[in-house]
Image: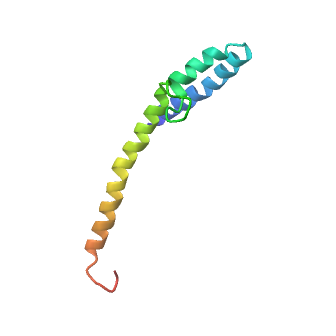
Amino acid sequence: MLFAMSAAIIAGLGVIPLREHLNASGNSDSWNVINHLLFADISASGNESAIGLFYIIGQLFVRSLQLVIVPMVFTSIVLAMVRISDGKTF
């Protein structure tokens, strides 16, 4: 997981100079294509035709974490309440 996070940080930092180079050289259309394919927020207005692969992958990751963590916390709270035998400590 540490390797994947490091690779993502390096890739993310590598995209910044690419964006600056494309915008400075007048190839902003190329950057717009890359942005629509990879980074665009597909739920925002004006991005209806965008693909946004990284946005979709990020949303799937966050929602899968929520899918796992919320039931785990609920179960932990319920089990802690069940284990309390004395009503005064509850």
Residue at the outermost bottom position: 88
Q: Nearer the viewer, residue 51 or 62?
A: 51
Coloration of the structure image:
rainbow
Q: Quadrant of residue 11?
A: top right
Q: Quadrant of residue 33?
A: top right
- Residue 46 vs 22, above or below: the answer is below
- Horizontal relation, residue 68 to residue 20: left or right: left
Q: Residue at x 28, y 84 (%)?
A: 86
- Residue 88 vs 22, above or below: the answer is below
Where does the C terminus fall, quadrant-wise?
bottom left
- Residue 39 vs 59, above or below: the answer is above
- Horizontal relation, residue 11 to residue 24: left or right: left
- Residue 65 vs 17, above or below: the answer is below
Q: Residue at x 51, y 22 (%)?
A: 37
Image coordinates of residue 45 in percent, x first then y, are: 55, 34
Q: Residue at x 70, y 18 (%)?
A: 23
Q: Nearer the viewer, residue 72 or 34?
A: 34
Q: Nearer the viewer, residue 25 or 46?
A: 46
Where does the N terminus fall, quadrant-wise?
top left
Q: How many marks do you count on the picture?
A: 0
Image coordinates of residue 59 in percent, x first then y, are: 44, 38
Image coordinates of residue 14 in percent, x first then y, are: 61, 24
Q: Residue at x 43, y 32 (%)?
A: 57
Image coordinates of residue 28 in percent, x first then y, are: 66, 17
